[in-house]
Amino acid sequence: MSDNDYIDYSKEEKSAPKKQPNVDSKKESKSASRPTKTSSFTQILNGDFLTKEFVLNNLNYIFFIIFLLLLVVGKGYYGKQLSDDIEAAQQEVDQNAAEYIEAKARLETITRRYKLVEKLEKRELKETQNATKVIRVIKKDNE
């Protein structure tokens, strides 16, 4: 017979005598005809899942997903770093504001009127008792 000839297996099965398989041969034939399936967990541990055609055909998509996962992790670290920097800057601003208020309070206590009078008495300067006078000069537009 050539390779292109049609083979009718149904006629051959009718002519062949049927034998009764015993129970043990059924179990053996099932296990022999079908490869044993391993669990997904063992395939992952062995690395067998990487050789499957589905994974090989979708490597670009898998790498893209891994890249996105790395971006998400990086974004988390960047956000944490930003929040730490903001917190440190806020503490510095609060410290500077407290120093400003403290310096302003010291300046007000030092420059109070009665303390200035006491310091100027050493130089023999006295506080005036008369109110200050303002001299205003009015300019004319023609001149």
Image (tube, grey):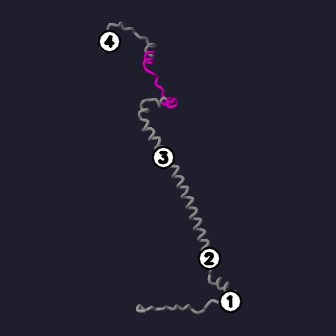
Instruction: Residue at 45% x, 41% y: name it.
Output: 65
| Residue indicated by mark 4 | 2
Sequence-wise, the earlier of marks 2 and 3 is 3
Q: Name the kind of residue labelled 1 in the image.
A: Glu
The numbered mark, 1 or 3, whose residue comes first in the sequence reads: 3
- Total count of labels: 4
Question: Up-down: is 105 above or below 65?
Answer: below
Residue at 62%, 76% in the rendered image:
107
Amino acid type, callout 2: Leu
Judging by the rendered image, the residue that carries numbered circle 3 is 72
Query: Position of 23 compared to 111: left or right?
Result: left
Q: Is 44 within the magenta?
A: yes
Q: Earlier in the sequence, mark 1 or mark 4?
A: 4
Measured in 3D between alpha carbons, the distance from the residue under mark 2 to the one under mark 3, in whole angstroms, is 52 Å
Residue 29 place in picture, x, y as percent: 43, 15
Determine the image quadrant of residue 111: bottom right
Query: Which residue is denoted by mark 1 in the rendering?
Result: 124
- Sequence-wise, which precedes: disc 3 or disc 4? 4
Magenta span: chief secondary structure: helix
Residue furthest to the front? 143
User: What amino acid does circle 3 point to?
Assistant: Val
The reply to whether the C-beta atoms of the residues labelled 1 and 4 are less than 8 Å apart is no
Q: What residue lies at 51% left-to-right and 49% top-to-bottom?
A: 76
| Residue 107 disc label | 2
Of labels 2 and 1, earlier in sequence is 2
SS for tag 3?
helix
* Residue 66, x across and y down, in percent: 47, 41
